[in-house]
Amino acid sequence: DVKVTQSSRYLVKRTGEKVFLECVQDMDHENMFWYRQDPGLGLRLIYFSYDVKMKEKGDIPEGYSVSREKKERFSLILESASTNQTSMYLCASSLPGDTDTQYFGPGTRLTVL
Amino acid sequence: AQSVTQLGSHVSVSEGALVLLRCNYSSSVPPYLFWYVQYPNQGLQLLLKYTSAATLVKGINGFEAEFKKSETSFHLTKPSAHMSDAAEYFCALTKHTGNQFYFGTGTSLTVIP
């Protein structure tokens, strides 16, 4: 069965802290994605990766970075968390074809105080 | 340019009534379209997808969607709503560049007993 896991379901951090969100998939997928979800805005792509050590900016990369050292793991890093980064963060993975399904993790609800 | 528009951020139906969630797209290339469902505090789960085969696509939980090129639509329907259908629904369009998606802003479905 397909599985994407995220390290935390709920996270509370303080402004200025460095925050790591981890995502692991067990499907040997090439592609991995990080989205943030906000009410009324849907899902917005932050970063994605097509392969190990590769990364591409999505639509809203400012304030974020990513790391993909192993195929199964894709980390999202908030270098200095700010209150406007309070959101639900969703990780997804997929095979590389245009018609391939993206499989999502359960999400991490991050609150920055 | 490619985009997805979901008409109606909130839809309420009575239990047993028809569910109709609207999605219109804009695409300069033949589109691949997806519907995902998100239950409270969970990630997104694929309901169905259109990949240029049959225009009427059947998905899980009794949902189906019809691709209508002339109307640039991909509306999601279910003949009879169940209480368990209450969730948020997202329409998505592939960008045709490495499985990146455009997501709509979502429609929250409430089922009234």
Image (tube, rainbow, N blue to C red):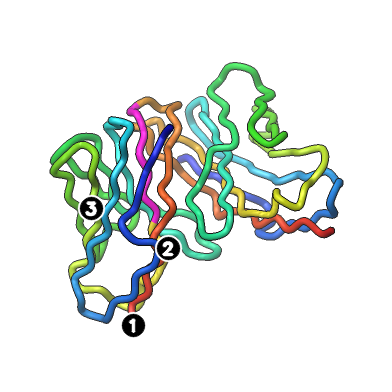
Q: Indicate whether A80 appears above or below B27.
A: below
Check if mark 3 and mark 1 are on a common chain: yes
Q: In this view, does A53 lie to the left or right of B66?
A: left
Mark pair 3, 1: CA separation = 22 Å
How packed mark 3 is, by other alpha carbons closer than 10 Å (few <14, some 14-19, many 20 or more), is: many
Q: Which chain contains the residue that carries disc 2?
A: A
Helix, strand or loop under label 1: loop
Residue B111, image x and y in percent? 77, 56
Pointer 3 chain: A
Residue drawn at x 54%, y 33% is B33
N-terminal of the two: label 2 or label 3?
3
Q: Which residue is at the front of the view, A111 or B9?
A: A111
Task: Say whether disc 3 or disc 1 marks the residue closer to the N-terminus.
Answer: 3
Q: Give the range drawn in magenta.
A: A90-96
Q: Is mark 3 on a helix, strand or loop?
A: strand
Mark 1 on the same chain as mark 2: yes
Locate the N terminus of chain B by quadrant: top left
Label for residue A113? 1
What residue did someone put label 3 on? Answer: A75
Figure check: B54 above or below A16: above
Residue beneath the point at 79% across and 46% down: B81
Which residue in the structure is indicated by mark 2?
A: A88
Q: How many residues crowd mark 2 within 10 Å: few (<14), some (14–19), many (20+)?
A: many
Number of dots carrying numbers:
3
What is the three-letter code of the residue carrying label 2? Met
Residue A91 included in the magenta stretch of the image:
yes
**Residue B106 versus residue B26: which sits nearer the camera?**
B106
Q: Mark 2 to mark 3: distance in Å? A: 15 Å
Q: Mark 1 lies on which chain?
A: A
The amino acid pointed to by label 3 is: Ser
